[in-house]
Each structure stands twice: as C-alpha cells, then as structure tokens.
Image: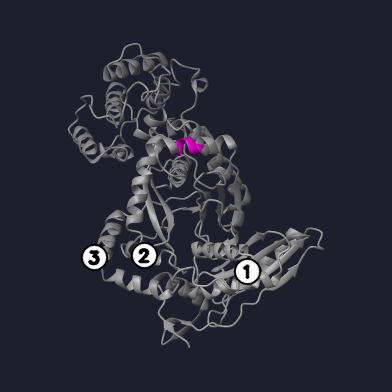
Amino acid sequence: MSHAFPLLASQREVWLGQQIDPTSSVYNLGLYVALPGDLSRSSLEAALNRALAETDALHARFVEESGTPFQVLDGSGDWSVSEVDTSGAADPEAEALAWMRAEVATPIDLSTFPTFASALIRIGADRTWWYQRFHHITLDAAGCMGFVARVMELLGRSGETGTVAGDNGDSSIRLLLEAEEEYKDSADFRADESYWKANARGRYPRTALGAAPPAPPAQFPQRRSVELSSEVRAALIDVCDKAAVLWPAVAFATVAAYLHLYDGATDITLSVPVRARTSPRTNTVPGMTVNILPLRLRVHGGMTLNTLIPRVTAELDHLLLHQRYRGEDLRRHIRGQGSDTRLFGPTVNAVTTDAGAEHSMPTFLCGGPVEEFQFQFMGGLDCQQLGIDLLANPAIYSPEALATHADQFCSLLEQLTRQPDRRLGQATDLVPVTSQQDLGCPAPSRNEDSKESTGTTGAAESSLPPGDSDYSESPGMRGSSLSREVAMEGLTEIWQRILEIDGIKPDEHFFDLGGHSLLAMDVIAAVEDEFQVKVSVRQFFACPTVRELANIVLDSAEQGDMSDMGGPDDSILDVVADLSDAEAATLLNRLRTGGSTPGEVDA
C-alpha cells in the first residue's frame, strides 16, 4: 500500500535543484567500503535488504501534483546487487574507481523506485569492495554513514542477517515530518529566527580562498589529503586535553586562522553542515535533514590558538543551539536585503565516528555538491584515525592552487598545535604573499593599510614589512627625515611609558611583556601623535616588537601623508572581536574622547 507524504524542507531544495536540471547527477552520493575477505554477493544482498527494510527514506519515489512534490513510500521487493570483476585489469583498483565514477554520474529518475544502486566489486583474491549510490534527496551524508554502519553490523553477524529483527529503532520518516511541523509552530522557531536575523545584521563578509567568479557546483571536486604525523597528532591531543575540548573545535579554529592569514580578513564566515536534529526521538532516523548555517568568527593577529578555541567553541554552541532554522531561509532573508555575495564561505565539515568503526569507514566518491571550497575532517574522538581532506571546485581552483592550500594548511596546523600560545601574526611566513598572487587573490602593496577587511582585499596580517636588510640606507630613508635610530628610541620610550617597564629590548614581544588589547591602542595613539604617521591595528598585531614596528613607522613617514587617518572607528573592529562587551565599550569611549590612559583590563 502506497503512502504519500510531503517533502522535508531540506528535500524541497534538492528537488528544486534536480528539476532545474533533470540530467544532472550533482546530487548523487557515491561511496565504497573495503570488505573483509572474499564476501559472497548473496551475503551482501541479505544484509542490504535487511537494512533497507529498516530505512523508510529509501523506499521513496518522488512525484509532483499541481506543482507540489510528494514522496511516495511504496518501494518493495528485494534489492539486487550487481557484481563487477576488475581483478584481471592491469590496475584493478583504478578500473574499479573508473567504473564507480561512471555509475555514480548517471542521472537518477526520482519518480521511479529504486533511487539507489549497489554493487560488489572484486579487485583481487580475497579483496572486494562494496559500492553504494544514493540520491541526496533520500539521505544526507550522515544518513549514508549510518546506513553503512548498519550493513557492516549485519555482515558481522555471521548467519544472522535473515533472522535479526526490530533492533534498530523506529526509522519512519513520519517522525522527521512531524518534528518539522511541530518546530515551525513553536517558540523555538521564533527564537531561532530572531537569533539568525540578528546574526546576519550588516550582512556576512565575503570569505574565500580565491578571487574567481562563482561556478556551478561540482559533483567530483578536486581532492587533496593532509597527512598528520604522529607528533602532530600527539600535539593536537595535548591541545584538546588542556583546552578541555574535542578536536572539531581545534579544526574550526585552525581553518579560521588560515583564512585570516591568507587574506587578512578579521570578520570570517564559515559554512557548517549540521544535522538539524535536537531530539532523541529523531536522531537515529535515516533521512535528509542536513542544514548549512554560517559560523561567524572574529580573528586578528594578536590571537593565539589557545585564545581562539574558546571563542570558536562559544560560537559553535550558539550555532548548534539554533541549528534547526533553515539556512535557505537565512539566505533568502539576506538576499532580500540586497546582498549578492556568495554565502556563507568555505565549508568546514567535522564528522566524528564511533570508536572502532574506522575499519568500516566509507570512502566517498562524491558526498554532495561542492560549491567552492571545503575542509573535511573525519575520525574518532581519539584523533588517532583523523583524516583531513581539502576539496575544491575544479571550475574555480586549479590542482596547483589546491595543493598549495593543502601544504600551507598542514604547515599551519602543525605549527599552531605545537605552539598554541604563539600569536597568529607570527605565523604569516606560512602563507606568503606570493602564494596569494598565484592562487588568484590580489596581492597587497607593501605595508598596505586596508581598512576593515571583507576578505576581498589583499593581506594585511600576512604581509609583514620587510626585514632590516631592506632598510640598510637609513638614516635618510630615501628622503624621509626620520632615521631608524630615532624611530627605535622613540618607540622604546613609548612602550616603556605605557607598559611601565624599563630596559625593553628591540625584539621583545609586546604581549609577552604584559601588553593587551587596550594598551595596544594606547601605543598606537602615542605612535601616531609622536611620529605623525598612520599605524593600523592589523599592522601592530602583526609587528608586535619595537624593531618590527619601526619598519611600519619608517615606511609611513616616507609616505608623509596623514590625510587618511580617519576617525577612531577605522581600526577598532579589528580588536573589539577579542574583547568582552564591557571592554569594547571602554575602548570605544577612550578612542572617541581621545583618552590614552593605560587600561586595566587584560584582554
């Protein structure tokens, strides 16, 4: 007997996309799993059919009446498994991968059952792969992984796959539909809507790793894996233990740090896939509920990994608390305000797996459309099997660009986990300006003082001023009347007065001497008053020693132009992100009233 049900909100978006281009396979999900031993096709079929009987969502076909789509649950009969043998090929694995890529690229007719396909691939003696294809409208990636885990569990019950019954809970899609309807009429929905509209006020900044225009989503993105050494894994575990967090918090923090160092952006937005389920009643129901929401973070060069992690954790907590509000509705709200930016930024997907499940982890050939760039983390909570992949839309990023990003991100992750108290402004050598040019982002001029960055301008944090060797002609400085000696002496006196410390050396770090955000603003104000030059907050956090700051002062003095000094708000947003509300209010008041009394708040 057939039962027709409406579509979930997440399904409607996929349905619409597929109707726009019925011949597209971009919504196909494809994966494979290495199976133990020489498994027979009948054994795999038995396990698959048992798991299918427990998965309501996979019984659906999709029809349309008067412009309204419905899902009809009437799929029945046995699920047949194809058998493919590539063991005789010169390269059996490559042949198998080519076959799977061709199969998963086949468009699916959503009006017919089944919308999935399975195959047992023999690639050698006692070596078999299980290939599985779904359509994204039926299952999201989490649902796929849950289905795979269930099949592997059933395969592990030798001789029991036909007799085990009723041990996987209620998997009815009715539970998901009922929960969605209840949510729409609830106070939770209204609270979530208010939260996200407030979060989007002022629009989200453009956050990207390239300057290329948008392109259609890719089904088969470029992929580059980041290999972690045992030493880096140990350092990552140590950071997590000391910060009392799980590795996803460190993953998000490191990506945010990388984006900041890449182009100098201080207001960063990441796209975060969430399950959009908060009830135990629906958590185990296979289906398509994935939701993409923005994670907005403020990052600047004075921060460290250890100071960034708690801010990431707090923002993630807020996001998860309000994860049921649909990202599509938020996009429409923002575009209704006239924004034409790409929302919301690179995707960061952190997937944790159960202990001991690594042996049955699927390898995704395609896990859904990749719009631009994706950081994918997957593994157990112990970090030992943590895998990291960087995925890029090939219409936007070249293989060389992706490789460079992967190498730079790996280097940054290694450095930050080994030195979690090191300022981000000191890690700029890992993301050189020349690489930014190669990857399509506009390179900044030397010591460019970009104002509040939206991610479209050149780097500020990542373009430190030249070293002392570039200033060998001082005094005189190519026409400037300010010499290096005078600049160094003046800066040392300012630091000693504001920090109330004598004998400060040229290479001592401002923050290691007890400096903090408010005192940094006092130094900047004193420097501008003393030398009549413009120094931005970004520049100060990137150059927090007397010697480095002297380079900034000398370059600015050479330009000899104070016309763009602007008001106090020009640079305030770079540092307010690292302050509490009370500290930010104090700082704003002092800047606007011209006060320069040393602060007492340690940021």
User: Residue 558 location in percent, x, y?
Assistant: 40, 25
> Which is nearer the N-term, disc 2 or disc 3?
3
Q: Tag 3: residue type?
A: Ala
Q: Magenta part mainly helix, strand or loop?
A: helix
For discs 1 and 3, the disc positioned in front in the rendered view: 3
| SS for dot 1 | helix
Left or right: residue 94 compared with residue 189: right
Left or right: residue 98 compared with residue 448: right
- What residue do we see at 20% from left, 32% from top? 590
Distance CA(mark 2)–CA(mark 3) = 15 Å
Instruction: Name the foreground residue: 523 vs 119.
Output: 119
Query: What residue sits right under mark 1 in the picture?
Result: 104
Q: Is residue 238 magenta?
A: yes
Vertical placement of residue 558 versus 315, above or below? above
Residue 187 shows which numbered tag? 3
**Total numbered labels placed on residues in the image:** 3
Q: Residues within 10 Å of mark 3 (few under 14, many from 20)?
A: few
Marks 1 and 3 in Cβ contact (< 8 Å): no
| SS for dot 2 | loop
Instruction: Name the foreground residue: 447 vs 406.
Output: 406
- What residue do we see at 54% from left, 82% from top? 75
Based on the displayed image, in which of its 4 quarters is residue 301 positioned? top left
| SS for dot 3 | helix
**Residues rendered magenta in the picture:** 236-240
> Which is nearer the N-term, disc 1 or disc 3?
1
